[in-house]
Amino acid sequence: MGLLINLVFLALLIYIAYLVITVAVRHGIDSSEVGKIIKQKNGYQEEKFYPKDDLDKDY
């Protein structure tokens, strides 16, 4: 029983670490000066997602 609780706790910690790292990297790079320069240099435009349009497409 103790092993099961430890595995669940470990999985929860890994998930929380993943969320923290993802948010930190995404916001950190996007808002940094280097990130802004790279976006401007490469002409990066944020891709917009419209769920309604996605459902209407026939594949």
Image: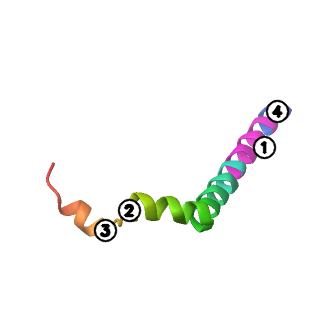
Q: Nearer the viewer, residue 59 or 42?
A: 42
Q: Residue at x 41, y 57 (%)?
A: 42
Of marks 3 and 4, the one in the foreground: 3
Q: Residues within 10 Å of mark 4 (few under 14, many from 20)?
A: few
> Is 14 included in the stretch rendered in magenta?
yes
The alpha-carbon separation of the residues under discs 1 and 3 comes to 36 Å
Q: Which residue is mark 4?
A: 1
The alpha-carbon separation of the residues under discs 1 and 2 comes to 43 Å
Of marks 4 and 2, the one in the foreground: 2
Q: Amino acid at mark 1?
A: Phe
**The residue tagged with tag 1: helix, strand or loop?**
helix
Q: Residues within 10 Å of mark 1 (few under 14, many from 20)?
A: few
Q: Quadrant of residue 44?
A: bottom left
Q: Quadrant of residue 14?
A: top right
Q: Which residue is mark 1?
A: 9
Q: Which residue is mark 3?
A: 50
* Highlighted magenta segment, given as a residue range: 6-16
Instruction: Name which of mark 1 and mark 4 comes first in the sequence.
Output: 4
Q: Residue at x 52, y 63 (%)?
A: 37
The alpha-carbon separation of the residues under discs 1 and 4 comes to 13 Å
| Residue farthest along the right direction in this orientation | 2
Of marks 3 and 2, the one in the foreground: 2
Q: Position of residue 22 (x, y in %)?
A: 62, 54
Q: Residue at x 38, y 65 (%)?
A: 45
> Is 55 included in the stretch rendered in magenta?
no
Instruction: Name which of mark 4 and mark 2 comes first in the sequence.
Output: 4
Instruction: Please state if 37 lies on the left or on the right of 6 as rendered.
Output: left
